[in-house]
Amino acid sequence: MSKVIGKRVTRVEDKRLLTGQGKYIDDIGTPPNTAHAAILRSPYPHAKIISIDYSEALKIPGVKGVVTGKDVQPLLNPFSVGVSAPVKYYPIAIDKVRYVGEPVAVVVAKNRYIAEDALEKIKVKYETLEPIVDIERALEEGAPILHENVGSNIANHRTFHYGDVDKAFQQADRIVKHRFHFPKYSATPVETYGIIAQYEESTDSYTIHANFHGPFVLHSIMAGALKVPSNRLRIIIPKDIGGSYGIKAGIFPYIVLCSVVSRLVGCPVKWIEDRQEHLAASSSCTDRVTYIEAAVRNDGKVLGLKMKIMDNVGAYIRAPEPACLYRNHANTTGAYDIPNLMLDAYAVMTNKLPTGLIRGYGGQETYFPLERIMQMIADELEMDPADVIRRNLIKKEQFPYKTASGGVYDSGDYEKAFDLLLKTGKYEEFRKKQIEARKKGKLLGVGLAVIVEPSGSNMGYITIALTPEERKAGLPKSGCTEAATISIDPMGNVNVRISTTPTGQGHETVASQIVSEILGIPHDKINVVAELDTATSAWSIASGSYSSRFASMGSSAVYYAAQKVKRKLIKIAAHLLQIDEDSLTIENGQIISKTDPSKSISIKRVAGSAHWNPLSLPEGMEPGIYETAYYTAQAEPPDDNDLINSSITYGFVADLVTVEIDPETGEIHILDYYTVHDAGKLLNPLIVDGQILGGLVHGLGGAMYEELVYDDKGQLLTGSFMDYLCPTATEIPRVTIKHIETPSPLTPLGAKGLGEGNTMSAPVVIANAVNDALKPYGVIIDSLPITPNKVWSMINQSTKQGVSS
Amino acid sequence: MKPAKFDYYCPKTVDEALALLEEIGFDGKIIAGGQSLVPIMNMRLSTPEYLIDINQLKDLQFIELDGSKMKIGALTRQTEIEMSDAVRKHLGLLSEAVPYIGHVQTRNRGTFGGSLVHADPSAEIPLSLMALGGTLHIASKEEVREVNVEEFFVTYLTTDIMPNELLTEIHVPVPEGRTGYSFHEISRRHGDFALVAAACQLSIDDQDRISKVRLVLGGVDAVPLLITDASVMEGEHLSAPLLNKIADMVDEAVNPESDLHATADYRRHLAKQLAVRTVKTAYERARGENNERS
Amino acid sequence: MNGSGKVILNAGIEKAWDVLLNPQALKNCIMGCTKLEPVEENKYEAVLSIGIAAVKGKYESTIEIADIQKPNHYKLIVKGEGGPGSVEATGAVDLVPIDENTTELNYTYDAEVGGKVAMVGQRMLNGVAKLIIQDFFKKFNKELAKSEQSV
């Protein structure tokens, strides 16, 4: 069997993507009477809608209809969400607007130009209300309340006590604590949301084309909102999606909106989101305030942690939130052996864009305070941060490691990876260089961060938002199911159907590698179909691409489906050749005897028999070759002690970043970025390095450039790429990537997911590096993004001596 | 993000364009590179009834050395300026500034004249022209008038040009003798709008005393700011005390705003830093040292 | 955004006050004001056609004069809505007599700009706000001079 898995195979997707032959949502043909939608959006962060007059808009030639909340409400249920707070969220404002950009009316017209002309003619009367955007102020007495029927701005609140936190804090030699703030920022795929929605009156059903990529639990939520049985909501995902990084999970309210608009206006509706809409009204990560306290022994060992975390989920809490708080629940203590943990977790609503999935999903918000406090502990104890990290890292012998909150880290060798990092990054040498540089008035700094990268979300984890009593009243959720289908057609050619809805990660390539190795067929002869159709694909609630789950879950489904096909082929071959099954193997397109190579038969012949001559098959065997495998790992729901293993596999990422700061201008120059990854068995190292770099640059964005800025009156200030700054090619530093592989014992190929790791680690490792460079000034970096202006202000305001030149 | 309806005209000659402008200029806009106009039209912040496309007026695309001045057509693409050996040789300051404008792709479309008429207070071309000095030739159906660059910029995004006029060419005096220049800017990312930018063009006599100097700062006021008091440098050698004086002068003269990307204080600080840096570099270059590009 | 400033007016305090609160004078001074009509006591409806470069808009506005303490102090509340965006601004004006022909006017303002212009125009907003205010006072001194002549 020739080895293909683990090889640096060039991507099969690239040829079409690089020659303009990709098939995206905007390339899909539409029925001739398709009309185009434009959305009128609220300019106010918080206001009552007094009246909407669209009579003038209807007069414009080419306008087919205008739809408002009042029209839509009778046809919809509010979206269900996994919290008990009775928040009513519709895809369009009903009587109130709660964030700048919230849809208020939809115009459907012959083309988008006319639709936008009509938007200008709609007159909306608002009565403005006091807005609130600050997370902590939103919790205070007298703060404006967004949802009257909820009565407060708390969408969800739970406290967790694991181990014996009080004892740990009593036994500590000292407590190190601080408040941290992580900014609200987004993922900005080149392709925005796109939907073609069609309501068919004859069957009372909806057919939707959209660049949605799961998690497909949201399909049930959409069907519930549309008040249709789930088999009357057909969602078809195109072959190519131009990037997402999680953000296109948030398209689901717009799918429901376009669906119901299509129904009301009476024709198919196409909507392609523009960039301004995307920045203001698609989705984003949460901004988070964390109060973290560490109980520390004087040798650097952390005995326990207390964390009060407040996530700003925006104006409406919507599924799958508050997953932002809980996706990393199992790995809250990161790569460290800390058995005592108190978590006080809030999901707070304010007048900002509602949140959802994003690459990293809660990881960057969790690791920012954790890795910063580890550096602060080192500073206070006058120890080297590397030594503090080592003192606390989970040891190799401790795997599988049970975390305080119920996580099970499947495998790892953190010390090996960390040592490799320090060696590759020449840490000791840099520290010496730093001392010399300070004497000359130069500000050099080095930052470290170690994190655990979870992958393959356990669908049970979201119920941790409910108390054990509340959970008992509902149905339990578990698993992380994925499916794949492999078929061989009458001419012996292989088709693979996956339900991981790739958005550019190269699933087609990796799937073909797996099938190629198992069935002994060249990978470029295998056709992988990435389009998903909820009516015809094999899928389940966990399907989709998010949580880096392809390598861990998606690949496993493909693997097991391929094994099923292999078994059937061998059974048929054994029957046709009249020899024992166990003596057969597959290689080079042949099913061949291990002991007597003259006894062989081609896959083409075997598959052909299954179609052309089914009577030649073994007794009782079905004709054809069509195998579907549904796969799940053992992912259990939370127990009564709120212990939950929120993910399946856990990788490890260790980063080292060196910076130089210009004390005159505050400019930050990243000298080097070293990162060591352990993602188990790598299925395609070429794709892996691309993913890592992408995640890294996304994290760099959060560290230094990107933020969705709202002023204190709730006005969005970064509504275009002039002000929302994404790192471009020229901002990417020199990056060195190294790998070690400790395979996962839980997946058939030993693979763990990756791609989100550096998004979680880059913000904090860069903060640590800058903080280290500014150590002579005694500054503490506790918020992001770090800009030259902020650095210069910190240097100026510092009362310490600093460096002299 | 689709623009509102407009009527589109594409004149083939300058006279045709001027006749059109006379008729519909007040409700219309000229489009050349479109790098600033198209986005604001797509966002419907600007809804001109007419667009007059001047991209066919090839007569306005030229770079010519005429004795002691450089004549540049308003329609000359920024890339052409970037690639021009003549500009590099005679108007080095401009050559050093142009690579800071946006990105290669936008410079292929953006024009010299378009940037001047757009008059963004942080833009590189207005700043460079202010430092080099020059006259702008503005044509209407009735006449052609010349305006000195010092009078051209009025306030944010506003120049002396009337809606029925067309900027046709710009004449820039070629610095002679022992001259040096320097352009530098600080921005959040490569290609972004400058937070603060500085341009300095100076000449020295054969005793290394400064004989002429123009120092201009961008991003610190409503227009590119010519530091007129910098003439105090004339007759002096460059020295540390003189550089400190320049920093103080700049501190007095600038009037920066705070925005999302930088506070007024920070801009003020950067203005001082960049002024000192560009004057120093220009002086060194005039003396024949420091020929590295910034 | 907010700001403050000081202007010297070439008139005595009583005169300055009268002209400041005269609707016709206001109409001449507010940039692009094409209509200013009273709807209630001390409340006006106005249409402001403001254009900075290519960004032009017609803003349906209300202007309210409040907290009147003749001749030293009043508040101006301006709300405007137009295509490019909306604005809600409160300004406090304080007059201090210098001599019989000169008055010092101190102002502070707090403005909330919304809509498209707020989302994409942050680089220019503060500067443009100052421009509009400076323009107002430049025109205002001209109004004062005009009313001197007509007396």
Image (tube, coloured by chain):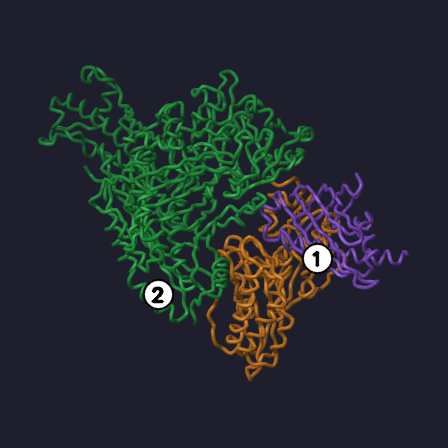
Chain colours: A green, B orange, C purple
The image's mark for residue A8 is: none
**Badge 2 element:** helix
Q: Nearer the viewer, mark 1 or mark 2?
A: 2
Binning the other alpha carbons within 10 Å of mark 2 as few (below 14), some (14 to 19) or many (20 upward) gives: many
Q: Chain of mark 2?
A: A
Spot occupied by residue B257 in the image (x, y as percentages of width and height):
60, 58
Q: Which residue is mark 1?
A: B161
Mark 1–mark 2 Cα distance, whole angstroms, equals 55 Å
Residue C78 appears in view: yes
Picture residue at 35% right of the left edge, 45% below the top:
A305
From the viewer's perspective, is A63 left or right of A338? right
- As drawn, which residue projects farthest toward the left? A595
Numbered disc total? 2
Q: Quadrant of the N terminus of chain B?
A: top right
From the viewer's perspective, is A674 left or right of A570? right
**Badge 1 element:** loop
Relative to C88, is A70 above or below? above
Binning the other alpha carbons within 10 Å of mark 1 as few (below 14), some (14 to 19) or many (20 upward) gives: some
User: Which is more toward the observer, B80 or B116?
Assistant: B116
